Image: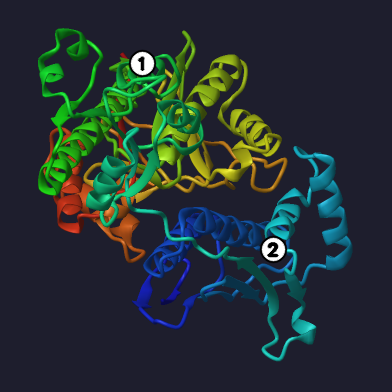
Amino acid sequence: MQTEHTQKNQGRRQLATDGFSHVSHGIAFEDMTLVRNELAEFLRLRGVGGEYIGNAQLIITEILSNIVKHPEKKASRVEIGAHVTDTEISLSVSDDSTPFANFDAKCEKALDVLHTGITGAETGYGLGCILALSPTACYVTKDNDPDNLNRFTAALQIAPQVKPEMRKKIFLIDDDPVSLHIHQAMLKDVYTVVSFEKAQDALKAFAGERPDVIISDLVMPDMDGIALRKALAGIENGNTTPFIFLSGRGTNESNPYISTLGVDDFLCKPVSAVRLRTVLSRVLNRSHQIRDAVESRFHQDITELLKPSLPGGFGSWRFTTRHRPVEAGGGDFILHQQTEASFMGVLIDVMGHGRQAKFFSYVYAGYLRSLFQMYAGTLDASHFLRYLSQSVAGDPLLETTIMTCQCFQFLPEGILKVASAGHPCPILARNGKAEVLDVKGPLPGLVGDSLYDMKSFQMRPGDRILFMTDGFLEAFDRRGHAAEALLSCIEDCPGGALDAYLWNKFETKSEKQRNNKDDATIIVAEYGGTP
């Protein structure tokens, strides 16, 4: 993938099979989301797992943040590259800014900072994270480079992937060796079959091997099938594992006591291979359906509880929110606190992929809620983001997750105050025109004690402010021109409810793309003027 663009992200993209390349005329904080997304797309297309994608994004983002923030002479050319093999992701960032001095000494200090657990205001912590992920990371200044560019290289080692065992595991229990052998032969080409002649042995092996289904004879010496079923019901996961009786005594099939044990089926010997496989398939499918239903209900309940929303208004301000969640991946959240003097809120986008990332984002939301409730009443937008960044940088779990957020304050007299941490810029709609408000800042926890600028804007009656997350913005154009496309869409709005118009456009574009892997949220705040 190759991209060349100006700081306004105008240019062209080409796909290539040999590697990823992003060339730009300078770099700014708002460009990093585009770079991260392009890199992630490139790695996903080559089958790279989510953990490695996140680490690669972290390395690139940390390097770019330092290039943006520290050099005396800012870069006018930045080249970002990536190459993937079966065992390694190679990353490189080249630029023509003022070189970093004493890089080797800074590396030693960064590793000391990382190993001693010092974070927060200490500089170099991000460099320490890079070195922890890529011990062979190297920096060459432009004085020693044939292209006259500073060059930072890093490599992520990809562990050999072991193909997961796709077969379901069956515990087969029968004290008759002949029956055991026959039924095992019926199933071994479709399932992984673990055979036991004694129920006690199966019970002991259950915790370590955790079968997907248990098929047990009914009448056995010492511990029979009924005793085994009752014993399983009393241990962890035993009662939820599907259980089938396979017995030579058909009269027990209608035994009312057996029906109270919670078994999934009762088969009589002799049983055909077709019948045995059919019942197994049905039981496994039903078990899968129940598990998915429980997880889905849990997801729905938590999603509804944490659904991003704001009250209808504050003073002369009117708020509307729209939100679309996805079942897997990170999450969007809105927190708010109101006093007589102001209304403060924060829009948060926790990134990630898969169901684990979704559950983690729920936990993260609770952590952020407690921070916000504790400090929102005493800090302004910029200071709250600074405190949040310090908290993230000081937590070894939270600092591994990429998050963007935007903190905003509404005052009754029409003043809007905004600070941003790696989040898409808000947009002002006024008199049929739309413009991006220049509010930028580094990702939370990325560069230690980050400072955030809070900008103030005086609104006029009828002005509307749009806040959004990446999941919404990127639907308008995935080629790097999303902001321009959204501005045009806002200016085309015929009047009325801006949120409804934009959301309809968003849903139409999302349906065409069919690649909805991220939560999407918008907030529209309209100022009605002095009462």
Residue 351: quarter of image: top left
Mark 2: few/some/many CA within 10 Å (<14, 14-19, 20+): some
Expressed as whole percent of the image width and height from the top left, the position of residue 103 reads: 83, 66
190 relative position to 35: left or right: left
Q: Amino acid at mark 1?
A: Ala
Whole-number angstrom distance, CA of label 2 to CA of label 1: 55 Å
Where is 310 relative to 58, above or below?
above
Expressed as whole percent of the image width and height from the top left, the position of residue 469 reads: 37, 42
Residue at position x 31%, y 36% in the image: 176
Between tags 2 and 1, which lies in front? 1
Residue 464 visible somewhere in the drawing:
no
Residue at position x 15%, y 31% in the image: 267
Residue 413 visible somewhere in the drawing:
yes
Q: Secondary structure at mark 1?
A: helix
Where is 328 relative to 266, above or below?
below
Expressed as whole percent of the image width and height from the top left, the position of residue 162 reads: 48, 60
Q: Amino acid at mark 2?
A: Ser
Residue assigned mark 2: 134
**Of the pair 430 and 159, the residue shown nearer to us:** 159
Residue 310: quarter of image: top left
Expressed as whole percent of the image width and height from the top left, the position of residue 227 reads: 36, 15
Mark 1: few/some/many CA within 10 Å (<14, 14-19, 20+): some
Residue assigned mark 1: 227
Q: Residue furthest bottom?
A: 146
The label number, if any, that marks residue 400 in the structure image: none
Residue at position x 33%, y 24% in the image: 220
513 relative position to 133: left or right: left
Residue at position x 28%, y 22% in the image: 219
Q: Secondary structure at mark 2?
A: loop
In which quadrant will I find the C terminus?
A: top left
